[in-house]
Amino acid sequence: MKNFWENVLVDTAASFSVVILCTVVFLAVFELVTKYKNWEEIRNGNVAVAMATGGKIFGIANIFRYSIQHNDVLLTSIAWGTVGFILLLIGYFIFEFLTPSISIDEEIGKGNKAVGLISMIISIGLSYVIGASII
């Protein structure tokens, strides 16, 4: 049985499954903190929301890439991925705070592609910084 858990395919399937589950959970958290409904807006063709959501998905996946790469134990990878997600979420709030002249959520919800693009780039950029700091 020990050889089963050390098999590369089993390890890959476990990591893949956990990251998919965590991504769904973390996107649900983002859905709770934004003023718009991500999937409803995307279904309606709101490109700004699609870009912002895509950046969040990439950011979460990139953080988990670093977490899996630097940790042998799946639970440790999950823990570091969760810490990384919390930092990404904090980065989102800092972005909103540092732009008091515009409401990021409202602009993205209204379809402002420029704000959606900046939001996407911030999520992607922060994910590299967060990932690089994961032990």
Image: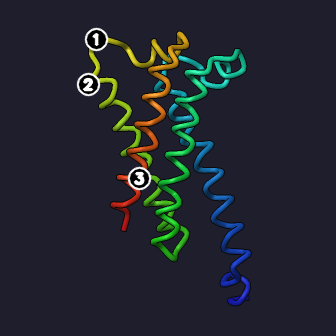
Q: Dot 3 surroundings within 10 Å: few (below 14), some, or many (20 or more)?
A: some
Residue contact at pointers 3 and 2, CB within 8 angstroms: no
Kindly state the secondary structure of the residue where label 3 is placed. helix
User: Is 107 on the left or on the right of 58, as rendered?
Assistant: left
Residue tagged 2:
98
Tell me the CA gap for discs 3 and 1. 27 Å
Q: Amino acid at mark 2?
A: Leu
Tell me the CA gap for discs 1 and 2. 9 Å
Q: Dot 1 surroundings within 10 Å: few (below 14), some, or many (20 or more)?
A: few
Residue tagged 1:
101
From the top left corner, tell me how far across and down residue 36 is, in percent: 54, 17
**Viewer-proximal residue among 16 and 123:** 123
Q: Residue 128, which numbered label?
A: 3
Q: Residue 77, which numbered label?
A: none
From the top left corner, tell me how far across and down residue 8 is, in percent: 69, 79
Q: How many marks?
A: 3
Tell me the CA gap for discs 3 and 2. 20 Å
Residue 118 lies in quadrant: top left
Q: State which quarter of the image contains the N terminus.
A: bottom right
Q: Amino acid at mark 3?
A: Tyr
